[in-house]
Image (cartoon, rainbow, N blue to C red):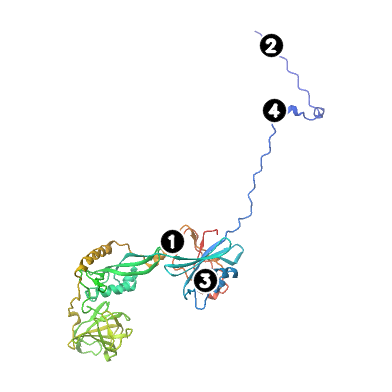
């Protein structure tokens, strides 16, 4: 079939200006919706947010002649706030006075643009660990006070240590109070020859009864309940016990009193430097009888009465230097030479108890260095102190024995498994970290308020390892009286009122 050719279509007529004279007919666009212009997004503001107020903690110490109003004035707290704070504090203190040296805890807020008028959010004073007085600011700007009391409970802890230097200083380094270590040493001194048996590195444990408030503050650092000293071949254990109708004292685990008629040695000394008997005199240069035992020890080491008795002599005595002689019985006496000074109240005619401090180690008289020359007399003649044997004075018996055995078994177990004592510094840090973690940031010193009396500021002794962000800077605060500046104790709190 032959293809049919179609003619080309006629070209469209040209569009002229006349075609637009009537404008556009809206009907021609029926069915179409006009596009709405897009809504404009809000542009971010270039203005910075107003700075948040800074909050700090400040600890001030009350000095002689100070008042709370004066302390607050020196950190530029407005007068109206000062008066309200003082009135609220007096209302809860009543007639109690704040002692010189007391620490005042402040929480301070500085507002943007008003750094010269800090706002006190709270003020607290804790004169006793179990009692605290707090003044707080309310939202309406008024101040009110409250007295807070804390329950005190006993807590048993142990201190483990090794002897390095004196036994007392080794215990204190481990967290034991000095008084507890002195009691421990005195209890041991009846049975332990400190000069021959006590060595460097020997281990010891003491069991303490502390008194602690419900919020963790220690009101008593620890009363000695029991102690144990390892001497290599043997261990010595002492246990505190009060028999019915009797005095409290220390016993060994068998119930035998550690108290003997005389101490083995009259001090916690490190070594015997010269023994009893004939020797070449170190100063005179010829052979002579040494009528006592010399114990080498640092100057100032306390010297204890070996037994109860009466002071027969106390003062300078020729080559003996400062010397004390005690009469214990008609037959027995002791002498102590080369002291640096006498103990409190020691003079002829005074009665002393066993273990009482009668003087302190020195190097007076004919002496080549600090030491104690110790003599022991029987029938008025000197004998070797280290060769004497002394009987125990008492034992637990009767109904007390069963009670003692139960207590002794409990203490011996606790010497091994009681919680270890928190050292004073570590306790403060741990307690602070519990309160502060997640809440506080370390303050930049440059943001502190001006302080006119920096000498009152209590320095912060330790940095809390668990405090959240906020680097410590070395910026110095603006201080009006730079000559009074000391280390400050401030911490920035979380922002907000």
Give the residue displayed 36% in from the left and 69% down from the top.
Answer: 221
Front tag of 4 and 1: 1
Question: Please, is residue 261 above or below residue 321 in the view?
Answer: above
Left or right, 314 with reference to 388:
right
- Work out whether mark 4 precedes mark 1 in sequence or the reverse, and give the earlier one: 4
Front tag of 2 and 1: 1
Q: Position of residue 446 (x, y in %)?
A: 55, 66
Front tag of 1 and 3: 3
Can residue 253 be spotted in the picture? Answer: no
Name the quadrant containing residue 31.
Answer: top right
**Cα separation between marks 2 and 3:** 121 Å
The residue under label 2 is: 4
Rendered-image quadrant of the N terminus: top right
Question: Please, is residue 29 above or below residue 249 in the view?
Answer: above
The residue under label 4 is: 31
Front tag of 3 and 4: 3
- Work out whether mark 2 precedes mark 4 in sequence or the reverse, and give the earlier one: 2
Circle 2/circle 3 CB separation < 8 Å: no
Which secondary structure, mark 1?
A: helix
- Work out whether mark 2 precedes mark 3 in sequence or the reverse, and give the earlier one: 2
In the drawing, what numbered circle is on residue 433? 1
Q: Position of residue 457 (x, y in %)?
A: 50, 71
Neighbours of disc 3 within 10 Å: few (<14), some (14-19), many (20+): few
Neighbours of disc 1 within 10 Å: few (<14), some (14-19), many (20+): some
Circle 1/circle 3 CB separation < 8 Å: no
Circle 2/circle 4 CB separation < 8 Å: no
Q: Position of residue 465 (x, y in %)?
A: 43, 61
**Cα separation between marks 3 and 4:** 85 Å
In the drawing, what numbered circle is on residue 90? 3
């Amino acid at each position: 079939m032959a293809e049919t050719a179609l003619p080309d279509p006629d070209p469209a007529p040209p569009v002229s200006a006349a075609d637009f004279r009537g404008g556009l007919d809206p009907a021609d666009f029926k069915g179409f919706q006009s596009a709405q212009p897009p809504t404009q997004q809000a542009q971010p503001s270039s203005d910075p947010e107003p700075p948040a107020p800074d909050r700090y903690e400040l600890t001030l110490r009350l000095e002689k002649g100070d008042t709370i109003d004066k302390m607050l004035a020196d950190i530029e707290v407005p007068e109206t706030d000062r008066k309200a704070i003082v009135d609220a504090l007096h209302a809860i203190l009543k007639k109690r006075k704040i002692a010189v040296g007391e620490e005042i805890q402040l929480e301070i807020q500085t507002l943007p643009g008003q750094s010269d008028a800090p706002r006190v959010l709270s003020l607290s004073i804790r004169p006793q660990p179990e009692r605290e007085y707090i003044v707080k600011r309310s939202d309406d700007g008024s101040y009110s006070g409250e007295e807070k009391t804390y329950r005190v409970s006993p807590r048993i802890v142990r201190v483990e240590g090794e002897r390095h230097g004196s036994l007392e200083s080794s215990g204190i380094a481990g967290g034991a109070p000095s008084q507890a270590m002195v009691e421990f040493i005195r209890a041991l001194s009846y049975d332990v020859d400190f000069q021959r048996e006590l060595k460097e590195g020997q281990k010891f444990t003491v069991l303490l009864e502390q008194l602690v408030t419900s919020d963790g503050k220690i009101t008593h650092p620890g009363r000695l309940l029991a102690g144990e000293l390892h001497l290599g071949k043997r261990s010595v254990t002492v246990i505190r016990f009060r028999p019915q109708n009797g005095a409290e004292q220390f016993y060994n685990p068998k119930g035998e009193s550690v108290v003997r008629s005389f101490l083995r040695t009259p001090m916690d000394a490190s070594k015997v430097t010269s023994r009893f008997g004939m020797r070449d005199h170190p100063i005179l240069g010829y052979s002579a009888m040494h009528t006592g035992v010399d114990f080498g020890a640092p100057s100032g080491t306390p010297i204890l009465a070996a037994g109860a008795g009466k002071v027969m002599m106390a003062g300078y005595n020729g080559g003996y230097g400062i010397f004390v002689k005690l009469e214990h019985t008609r037959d027995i006496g002791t002498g102590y030479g080369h002291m640096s000074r006498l103990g409190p109240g020691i003079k002829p005619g005074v009665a002393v108890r066993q273990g009482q401090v009668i003087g302190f180690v020195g190097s007076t008289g004919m002496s080549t260095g600090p030491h104690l020359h110790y003599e022991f007399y029987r029938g008025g003649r000197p004998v070797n102190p280290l060769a004497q044997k002394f009987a125990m004075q008492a034992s637990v018996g009767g109904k007390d024995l069963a009670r003692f055995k139960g207590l002794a078994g409990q203490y011996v177990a606790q010497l091994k498994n009681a919680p270890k004592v928190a050292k004073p510094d570590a306790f403060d840090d741990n307690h602070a970290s519990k309160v502060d973690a997640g809440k506080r940031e370390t303050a930049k010193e440059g943001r502190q308020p001006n302080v006119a009396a920096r000498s009152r500021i209590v320095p912060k002794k330790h940095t809390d390892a668990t405090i959240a962000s906020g680097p410590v800077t070395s910026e110095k605060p603006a201080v009006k009286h730079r000559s009074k500046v000391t280390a400050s104790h401030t911490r920035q709190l979380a922002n907000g009122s």
